[in-house]
């Protein structure tokens, strides 16, 4: 379907707004169902249609929709709480929810008319990779876009797809800001305009359907492209890295689910060699307490820094470098802490953890995979340190710097 066909066929849907409390309650209510379906989700290598329907029913995809446009406009803390609740059920479902709910945030960087097109369906799902893996040749009225992008999480059930590009003119890269490789823009187009490639054969997050996608000479009107450097809105969602804020909800929820699971196991398990109940074992007690301590510290860092950052930006103030970096380091810490917590619990449970369908096996694989995301890599920590010291970040976008 062409872009024009989509624009003409999108219905003007208007439903009563859900509150933050209602969305969180619905997310918590569906988490057990997601847990029950986790094996099916993994086997399908994408979210089954009924699971997508469950997520839509929670209101997760409309979380950031502005109140002025009939939405609940959850702040970053509330969004992360919802993603965390879903992740306690299934990591892939939560990952797709976290990615798919970015539509209203992207809309804040587009003109109002186009933004309303994107949000005509309050539960529209957007997928795609924003980093510039493609090229966009300037033509009258827009661009001819070509490229291949990786990690299109949720693209199998998305309405819209974003794709990062570097702009060219006459085949040559246009200059960007000082220090940048070129003029980085994001294009938005209907999911059907891209060729989706079945590449997602992974050890973890298998159900996220994070497939490659490509385009060749796809025409995208100028109005359907944007730069993170030029928001239409003001406040916290005008920050270029706004789409990154609720990402820690996934690892935090997985780690919480893993601890709860092992605590339930420990309540009735007895060590076969010694006959000692696990609840009385020094080793078990220590591992559980260490896991709780580590997760609690990571969780408080995430939510505390998000709350502080949101309040500052909503007040119209400018973040200091320390305030900006606090959320970045808390985000990386959440991913890495979750992996270490789940790995410690996996080791504690022993050989029983390796047999499928072991929930610990799946959670560990999910954590290992999500920690391979660029946002959890050493280059982000380096970028945070460089930002604090006035040096050169290797990944400037991760600390909110647009180049």
Image (cartoon, helix red, strand yellow):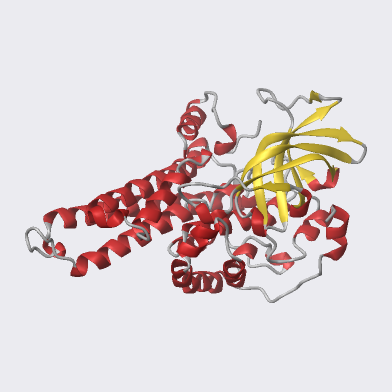
Does residue 80 appear in this view?
no
- At horizontal 66% and vertical 52% (from top left) the residue drawn is 127
Does residue 148 appear in this view?
yes
Which of the image's four quarters has the C terminus?
Answer: top right
- At horizontal 37% and vertical 47% (from top left) the residue drawn is 339
| Residue 323 coordinates in the image, percent (x, y) | 49, 42
- At horizontal 84% and vertical 38% (from top left) the residue drawn is 143
| Residue 139 coordinates in the image, percent (x, y) | 90, 35
* Position of residue 124 in the picture relative to residue 341 (left or right): right
Q: Nearer the viewer, residue 262 or 274?
A: 274
- Name the residue at the bottom extreme: 16
| Residue 29 coordinates in the image, percent (x, y) | 48, 74
Which of the image's four quarters has the N terminus?
Answer: bottom right
Q: Nearer the viewer, residue 79 or 319?
A: 79
| Residue 20 coordinates in the image, percent (x, y) | 56, 69
- Name the residue at the right extreme: 140
* Position of residue 234 in the picture relative to residue 247 (left or right): right
- At horizontal 26% and vertical 64% (from top left) the residue drawn is 263
* Position of residue 16 in the picture relative to residue 243 (left or right): right
How many numbered circles does the render carry? Answer: 0
* Position of residue 8 in the picture relative to residue 346 (left or right): right
Report which quarter residue 35 is drawn in.
Answer: bottom left
- Name the residue at the left extreme: 274
Q: Nearer the viewer, residue 6 or 313?
A: 6
Q: Nearer the viewer, residue 230 or 162?
A: 162
163 is higher (above) or lower (below) than 359: above
């Amino acid at each position: 379907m062409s872009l024009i066909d989509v624009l003409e066929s999108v219905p003007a849907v208007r439903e009563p707004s859900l509150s933050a409390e209602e969305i969180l309650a619905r997310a918590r209510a569906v988490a057990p169902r997601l847990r029950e379906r986790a094996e099916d989700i993994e086997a399908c290598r994408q979210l089954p249609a009924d699971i997508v329907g469950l997520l839509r029913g929670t209101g997760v995809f409309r979380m950031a929709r502005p109140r002025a446009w009939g939405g609940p406009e959850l702040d970053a803390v509330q969004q992360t709480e919802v993603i965390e609740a879903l992740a306690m059920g299934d990591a892939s479902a939560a990952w797709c929810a976290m990615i798919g709910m970015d539509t209203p945030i992207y809309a804040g960087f587009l003109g109002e008319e186009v933004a309303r097109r994107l949000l005509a369906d309050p539960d529209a799902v957007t997928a795609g990779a924003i980093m510039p893996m493609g090229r966009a040749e300037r033509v009258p009225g827009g661009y001819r876009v070509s490229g291949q992008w990786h990690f299109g999480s949720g693209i199998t059930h998305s309405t819209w797809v974003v794709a990062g590009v570097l702009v060219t003119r006459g085949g040559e890269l246009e200059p960007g800001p000082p220090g940048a490789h070129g003029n980085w823009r994001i294009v938005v187009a209907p999911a059907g305009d891209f060729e989706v490639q079945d590449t997602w054969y992974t050890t973890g997050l298998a159900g996220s359907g994070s497939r490659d996608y490509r385009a060749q000479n796809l025409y995208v009107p100028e109005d359907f492209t944007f730069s993170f450097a030029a928001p239409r809105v003001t406040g916290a969602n005008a920050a270029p890295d706004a789409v990154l804020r609720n990402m820690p909800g996934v690892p935090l929820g997985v780690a919480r689910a893993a601890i709860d699971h092992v605590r339930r196991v420990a309540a009735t398990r007895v060590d076969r060699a010694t006959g000692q109940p696990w609840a009385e074992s020094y080793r078990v007690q220590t591992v559980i307490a260490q896991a709780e301590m580590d997760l609690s510290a990571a969780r408080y860092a995430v939510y505390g820094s998000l709350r502080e950052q949101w309040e500052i930006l909503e007040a119209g103030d400018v973040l200091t470098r320390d305030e900006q970096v606090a959320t970045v380091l808390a985000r990386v810490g959440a991913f890495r802490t979750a992996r270490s917590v789940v790995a410690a619990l996996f080791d504690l449970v022993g050989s029983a953890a390796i047999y499928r369908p072991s929930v610990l096996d799946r959670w560990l694989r999910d954590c290992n995979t999500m920690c391979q995301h660029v946002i959890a890599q050493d280059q982000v920590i380096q970028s945070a340190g460089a930002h604090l010291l006035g040096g050169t970040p290797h990944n400037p976008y991760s600390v909110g710097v647009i180049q």
